Amino acid sequence: MIDERKPVAFGDLRGWMKALDGAGELQKIDAEVDWNIELGTIARLAQGAGTGPALLFSNIRDYGANARCRQVFTGGLSSTRRVAMMLGLKPDTHPRELVKLGRSVLTGSVPPNIVKTGPVKENVVLGDDIDLYEFPVPQWNRVDGGRYILTYGGVVTKDPGTGTMNVGVYRGMVGGKNQIPILMWRAQHIGHHATAWQQQGHKEMPIAVAIGWEPSLDFVGGSPVPKGICEYDVVGAIRGQPVDLVKCETVDLLVPASAEIVIEGYLGLDPETFLMEGPFAEFTGYVAGDASPKNSIRVTCITHRKDPILRGTIEGSLPGSYSENGMCSSIMRAATAWNVLDRAGVPDVTDVWCPPVQTGVNTLVQIKQSYRGQAKQVANALWGSSAAHVRYKHVTVVDDDIDIHDYGAVDWAIAYRVNAGENDIVIMPDTFGAGLDPSTRRRDRNVTQFGTGKWNRVLIDATINLDYDPDPGLGGARFPPTVWPAQDDIDAAKARWRELGLDKTKRE
Ligand SMILES: Cc1cc2nc3c(=O)[nH]c(=O)nc-3n(C[C@H](O)[C@H](O)[C@H](O)COP(=O)(O)O)c2cc1C
């Protein structure tokens, strides 16, 4: 049973860093580190498989004492311990409980406060004084097309009809002193807004990016919050207090009053104004998204706190190094899938998990089967949902005796409960899907041409096949019993454990 969560309002990025420091979760790096490749390399190596600390770099080459910005913070959410802290739970809360909480946490709502001013207004930079190169933006990877200033900022836009704001995380590269080309898919909520502004005849859309605030903003910005719900309301619910927002200087948008840095401007909608962006080391763990012309932010103002801290993240999960996106996706994408299954009426889903190494592209679902074909219902429900756009390519369904947090258990079920000749492997060809997956041919990754990537999806039904006839020789069961001992035999053996000297070994 999950402990009751106690929502925490950390105040700002600095409050969050203080909490991390107190919990032994922050590594401060005072030695000089180069923004060019070295910082990103250290971040990727240090994060490990969800085991590394958050990092604060405070001595960055070319950004010494007199620089406008001298520090970079990363890795705040690259472990389940820190995700649990952000949600107001004990750091050792099991990821299964985080998924269960994730099911409701994105529907909470505490509306924001609008305040007159705040620390983010301590410095206001306008016009010719704007120079993005004054910030220690990392060249995160040697292979990246440039220095990525937007990796974990909350990108704020507004529906021109309803006025509802959206906050999402979208990557953006320094394209000049005051230009940031970004990766914006039309299927994302920012894309819906861009289309709406365009349909009203506008060639630009107001935009603001809040960089460096409490971790719930990053977490919610990168999660699939339903359309029409403002992420600020959800953030308020997670932290248990309204977010204090201030008006931007040059656009009609609101941003957290104690953000470290806010970049304001207009996103170009006319292809004539597009700038080259990419490639980038992407969430798949591969270099993805070739250089191509993209919508670009024309920066009209930067506001920032005294001695601001640039918040960024190294994207890309792969074996041995799990990104913040991978860690948060493992929880939120599993929680979203579970909700999709519930809404579709799939009965008795008992657990859902997306291991962080693959950011929710493979999904594990545990069910208590009561009728034939239930696993196929799971896959159909997931793939028919818009939440499957860039997730749930491969769905593995197991019975409720298989712990989906133990990949060995899942592997065993696949070995002995899957029979491809009995339709336990089902391919759903030619569906929508992520445009960044290198297993899709280059032509089919052309999002500009097709609006989406192309995925051939697979269900692995690793449940016991209820289409088999019950076996009278097995007392009506369809499968033989496993060799796991009966409980009485286990109890008798365990009673002798100490006598046999087995209590000193680690294995239980
Ligand atoms: C670190 C990180 C980087 C991301 N980069 C992009 C990106 O460049 N483009 C994009 O469309 N989505 C990107 N995403 C995914 C979106 O943030 C995510 O789909 C989110 O739900 C979008 O917000 P929306 O639901 O309001 O559209 C990224 C997510 C994270 C966590």
Image (spheres, rainbow, N blue to C red):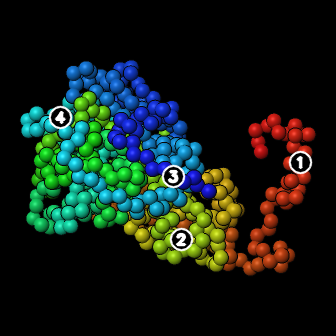
Question: Within 10 angstroms of label 1, few (less than 14), some, or many (20 or more) residues?
Answer: few
Q: Is residue 50 visible?
A: yes
> Where is residue 253 shown, x and y percent of the image?
19, 53
Q: Which residue is mark 2?
A: 378
Mark 2 lies on a secondary structure that is: helix
Distance from disc 1 to disc 2, alpha carbons, whole Å, reads 42 Å
Distance from disc 2 to disc 4, alpha carbons, whole Å, reads 52 Å
> Image point 64% across, 78% down: which residue?
371
Q: Which mark is residue 495?
A: 1
Distance from disc 1 to disc 4, alpha carbons, whole Å, reads 69 Å
In this rendering, the answer to whether 256 lies above or below 107 is above
Give the mark nearest the N terminus, 1 or 3. 3
382 or 145: nearer the eye?
382
Distance from disc 3 to disc 4, alpha carbons, whole Å, reads 37 Å
> Where is residue 171 shown, x and y percent of the image?
30, 47
Distance from disc 3 to disc 2, alpha carbons, whole Å, reads 30 Å
Mark 1 lies on a secondary structure that is: helix
Q: Which residue is mark 4?
A: 123
Marks 1 and 2: CB-CB under 8 Å? no
Q: Which residue is mark 3?
A: 5
Q: Which amino acid type corresponds to the residue marked 3 in the rendered image?
A: Arg
Give the mark nearest the N terminus, 3 or 2. 3
